[in-house]
Structures are given as structure tokens and as C-alpha cells.
Image (cartoon, rainbow, N blue to C red):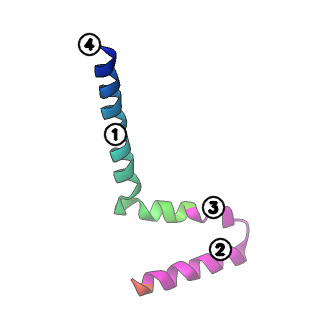
Amino acid sequence: MDIGMIRGLGTVVVLVAFVGLALWVFSPRRKQEFDEATQLPFADDPDATRHVEQAQASRSKKQ
């Protein structure tokens, strides 16, 4: 096993990790959790929270 084989296997491992992460991030089952996480910066400001929730509601009606 030479250095080229090790580098090739390392590339395959990174590619598999990238594809797995992309599938996890863009999974429809995770949307609710990520939507809640987007609200965290606005948790202390009720006006901002209301504005963002209204925008999300209008966006979901259009879809």
C-alpha cells in the first residue's frame, strides 16, 4: 500500500462524508428543526420573531 492508495482512500472517505452530510442537511425530516434554529438569534426580540414568523407563513402559503 503506497501513498497514492492512502490518498485515494482518504479522498473516498471525505467524499462519502460530504454526501452523507449533504443528505442529512437537506433532508425534509430535518426542516422543522432547522427552522426553529433559525429563530434563535431573534429569541429575545418579540417584534423580530413575529416579523420572521409572518414571513415564513406567507412563504409557506405561496408553496
Q: Is residue 2 above or below residue 59?
A: above
| Distance from the alpha carbon under mark 2 to that under mark 3 | 9 Å
51 sits to left or right of 14: right
Q: Is residue 21 above or below residue 30?
A: above
The amino acid marked with disc number 4 is: Met
Q: Earlier in the sequence, mark 2 or mark 3?
A: 3
| Distance from the alpha carbon under mark 1 to that under mark 2 | 38 Å
6 sits to left or right of 50: left
Query: What's the magenta region?
Result: 38-60
Please name the residue that numbered disc 3 is placed on. Answer: 40
SS of the residue under disc 1: helix
Q: Earlier in the sequence, mark 3 or mark 4?
A: 4
Q: Relative to the observer, which residue lies in front, 27 or 15?
A: 15
Residue density around tag 1, few if under 14, some if 14–19, many if 20 or more, within 10 Å = few
Based on the picture, tell me whether residue 43 belongs to the magenta stretch. Answer: yes
Residue density around tag 2, few if under 14, some if 14–19, many if 20 or more, within 10 Å = some
Please name the residue that numbered disc 2 is placed on. Answer: 49
42 sits to left or right of 32: right
Residue drawn at the location 55% of the way across and 60% of the way down: 37
Dividing the picture into quadrants, the one containing residue 51 is bottom right
Q: Relative to the observer, which residue lies in front, 48 or 20?
A: 20
Residue drawn at the location 49% of the way across and 60% of the way down: 34
SS of the residue under disc 2: helix
Percent position (x, y) of residue 26?
Answer: 38, 58
Q: Are marks 3 and 1 in contact (CB under 8 Å)?
A: no
**Which label belongs to residue 1?**
4
Circle count:
4
Q: Earlier in the sequence, mark 3 or mark 1?
A: 1
Q: Earlier in the sequence, mark 4 or mark 1?
A: 4
